[in-house]
Structures are given as C-alpha cells and as structure tokens.
Amino acid sequence: MMSSCYQLSFQLCNGSSGTQAISVRVPAPLKNVVRAGSAMVYMPPNSQRTVLVKLVPRELLYEDGCQQFDKSNSILSFNIHLYVASQPLQDYPPVKVPVYAIVANFQDLTIACIATRHMSNFLNTVLIDVGDCSIYETLWTEIHLTNNTALMQVCAFMDLPQAVVLEPSFGFCKLLPGQRRQFKVYISPEVRDFPSYSIGSLRNCNYFFKLMVDTVASIGQVATVSA
C-alpha cells in the first residue's frame, strides 16, 4: 500500500571457518523506497543472521526512469545484492535476493452513492444529500465501496458519529481486487447532534458528517477516502 511501511527479512548463513563481512546493497533508484537495516553485516564462523529490510512504497515509483517498477501491472521487482566485502569481486560474485511486491494506492478505494440523483461533487469530495430528517425518525441511504487496487483489502469505516450506523457488519468488510460491496447508511439524529443545540436553540439546520474508510494496511497513515 502506498506510503505504508513494511518490513522484510531474510537469513544469512556463514558456513566458513572465518569471520565474513557481508555488504548489503539495494538498487540506487530505490534508495528512498528500500532500506537495509544494516549496510554491512559481520558474521562469525558457522553463524546465522537475520537481515531486515524496510520497504516504503512512494509516489516516485510512478516517475519515469524507475526500471524496477512496472506501471502496467503495479509490480515492483528488484534484487538485493550481497557482497563478500573481504574477498575480490571477480572471485566471489554477488548473491542476489529477489524481492517482489504489488504496489496499491489507497486512493483507489472509492465511495459512491447508489442513487446518483442525491450525489454531487465538491472539491473532489462526494456529497450525499439524504433530505430532511427529524430527531424522531431514521433515514437511510445506500452506498457502495469499490476496491480498484490489485490487492485484497480489509476495510472499515472509522470514527462514525453516534447517530450513524452502517450495515452489514457495521461497515467492516473484505474486498477482493475489483470487488464492490454495498452498504446501507442509517442516520438517527438526536437533539445533541444539531449545531444549534449548543446555543440553546432547536432551529432547523444542516447536519453534516463525513464517512471515512480505512484499510488494515494503512492504519496510522494520513490517507482516507471521504464522502
């Protein structure tokens, strides 16, 4: 997932009778995307070490010149090279560790209204008008959430107001690539939900709230789709 942090690992084994210094290198074009936990690993005789690699997909992957990223299928593929620093390169060629990842953009999760006549767009935000509602009734409308990424996503609508309930499963779902899921949004406003209540008045007014969907992969990132 774009702008999320992932940790990879692989094992190094030194079966020789001497201490070895192993240089860990990533492709130069990916220096801001992939980082090894240690650029140099020292291994005693007959020992094993776990090497950690941090992967943070960024927008720069879509820039021209990044040969490791295929824009047509969103696949990032590259090799981590391991060199024996204490030996001549011509005698000990580097060991290549292949890494593959499907990069998805959180913005490829989209919210839309089933009844488009109640939907408009303002400043790249989908606005849904559910009409008039009193504090003695419940209104509902239907929306659908579409996964336009190349990965399976576990999604949830976060920070919902107390007056709003999503069904089924309270807005939690698992979406396969290209899958669309339909939800019903139930709105049951109470007196305290109206802005005029705080000033001692119950005049008619507009009640706004924002639907924000997040994924397990992007929790903690500043990336939400709003409607």
Image: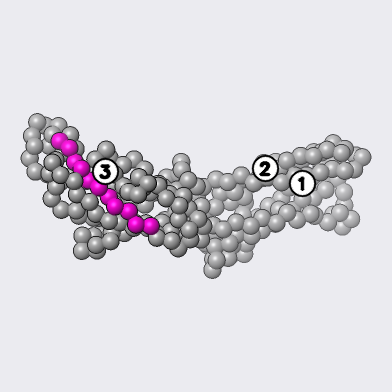
Q: Which residue is mark 3?
A: 164
Q: Tell me the kind of residue under disc 2.
A: Leu
Instruction: Determine the residue positioned at 37% across, 46% down.
Output: 169
SS category of the residue bearing label 3: strand
147 lies above or below 34: below
Q: Which of pointers 1 and 3 indicates the residue nearer the eye? A: 3
Q: Which residue is mark 2?
A: 52
Q: Give the side of residue 154 with respect to residue 134, left or right.
A: right
The disc, 1 or 3, on the residue closer to the chain's N-terminal end is 1
13 lies above or below 98: above
Q: Which residue is mark 1?
A: 23
* Separation of marks 2 and 3 at Cα, in angstroms: 43 Å
The disc, 2 or 3, on the residue closer to the chain's N-terminal end is 2
Q: Tell me the kind of residue under disc 1.
A: Ser
| Part of the protein shown in magenta | 181-191
* Separation of marks 1 and 2 at Cα, in angstroms: 13 Å
Question: Which of the colour schemes (rainbow, by chain, secondary structure, one colour) is used?
Answer: one colour
Examine the image and state in which quarter residue 135 appears.
Answer: top left
63 lies above or below 50: below
Q: Tell me the kind of residue under disc 3.
A: Val
